Amino acid sequence: MPFYLAFKELWRARGRYILFSLVIALITLLVLFVAALAEGLGSGNREYIEKLNADLLVYQANVDLNVGASRIGAARLNEIRRVPGVKAVGPIATSNGSVMLEGGRKPLGVALIGVEPGQPGEPPVVTGEGLRGRRAKEAVIDRQVALRTGLNAGDTVTIKTIQDTKEQYYTLRVAGVTDNRQYSLQPTIILPIRTWDEIRPQAVVGGVPDAEIVANVVAVRAGDPSPEGVLALARGIEGQVQDVVAVDRVTAYEATPGYSAQQSTLNTQKYFALTIGVLVIGGFFQILTLQKVPQIGMLKAIGASNATVGLAAVIQIISVTVIGVGIGAAATLLLSLGFPPTIPIVFSPAALAASIASLLLIGPMGGLVSVGYSLRVEPLTALGLSG
C-alpha cells in the first residue's frame, strides 16, 4: 500500500516532481563539480610528490617544508646516503621554464624537475624509455605535457628559460612519457640533474661546468618500508645529519604553500551546497505536505495507519532524490567529456562516490520534518469536522 500511494501521487503530479528533480540535479551538478575541482587542484599540487618512488623527503631545516626555499648540497646528500636503513637516495631540484609550441601558439609553462637517473625521483615511463645519464640531452615528459603539445617519445622538445636576463632555447630529445605528474599546478618535464642545472633559469648562461649542484630536497627509499621502519629512519636521518627535516610524502605535499587553504575553501563550498540542498528539499516537501493535509486526513479516516502514511512520504522523498541525483550525475559526466585538459577537473571514483552518497542522504534528511508533520495530522481536524 505505501508504494502504491507514493507512486500513484508521483505519477499524477509528475510535472511538479520532475521539476523538483531537476532542481536536485542542479544541486548535484554544483556539488560534483566543486568536488572534482577540489580533487583536480589538489592533484595538480601534489601529484609529483604523492607518486614519488620514495618513502621520505628530506628538507633543509627551518624552511617550513617549502621546497623552493630548501637547499641540500652534495656533502649533506652523502651524509644522508650513509645513514643506516637508507636503501636509495635521489636529489630533486625544481625550477620553471616554457615549452615552445608550433603555429604561433603561446608557450606552455612547465615545471622543470632535475633528478638523478635511476634513483628515487625519476618516475616510471608509460611509453619510451627512462633517462640514460646525468648529462644526457633528453627529458621525460608527463601526460599533461604530451596532451597539450602533441609530443611523444622520440620527438624533440624546445625549452625556453631566462638566463642572464636573456631568453635561451634548448632542444632535447623526449626519451619517454610518464603519467600525470603535475607540480605546483604545472605539467612537468623531468631532466637529468646535470642537464637541468645547465638550462634552469640562472644568472650565468649555461651555468658553471662541473659546479656542485644544490638540490631542493632529497628523496629517500627505506630498507624497511613499513610505517614503523620509515618513522625510525626519519628519526635516524634527523639525528645523524645536521639541519635537515625528514617527512613522509603526505606531510610533504600537505605543506605545499596554499594547498591546505585551497582544499579547505573548496570543501567549505561543497558543505554549503549540501546544506542548501537539505533546506531546499525540506522546504519543498513541507509545502507539499501542507497542501495534502485534507488527503492525509481522509486516508487516516478510512483506516490508513501512520506507518503507511509515513512510509509513502519517505518513498516519495527517496524516489525524487534518486532521480534528481541520477540526472545531475549523468549531466556532470557528459559535460566533463568536453573539458580541455587545461581545466583542473578530476572525477576520482572515491570522491564521486562520497559526494553522491552525501547527496542521496540529504533527501531523507531534508524531508524528515514533512514526514513528522504528516504523522501528526488528525483526521477530523484535517477534514474540518473537529467542531
Image (spheres, grey):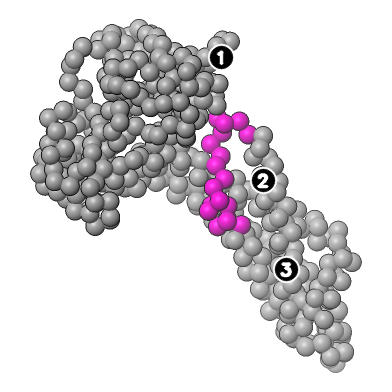
Marks 1 and 2 sit apart, C-alpha to C-alpha, by 30 Å
C-alpha separation, residue under disc 3 versus residue under disc 2: 22 Å
The answer to whether 101 appears left or right of 113 in the picture is right
Please name whichever residue, 65 or 295, is drawn nearer the observer in this view of the structure.
65
Above or below residue 241? Residue 127 is: above
Left-right relation of 194 to 150? left
**Segment colored magenta:** 339-356
Residue at 16% x, 37% y is 81
Residue 191 circle label: none
Which residue is drawn at the image coordinates 10% and 44% (left, top)?
Answer: 240
Instruction: Indicate whether residue 345 is drawn in magenta.
Output: yes
Coordinates of residue 259 in the picture (x, y in percent): 40, 42
Looking at numbered disc 3 in the image, what kind of residue is underneath it? Ile
Nearer the camera: disc 3 or disc 2: 2
Seen from the viewer's position, the closer of residues 92 and 263 is: 92
Residue annotated with mark 2: 332
From the viewer's perspective, tell me whether residue 134 is left or right of residue 329. left
Q: Amino acid at mark 1?
A: Arg
Residue that label 3 marks? 317
Residue 323 screen position, x and y as percent: 74, 59
User: Which amino acid type is shown beneath numbered disc 2?
Assistant: Thr
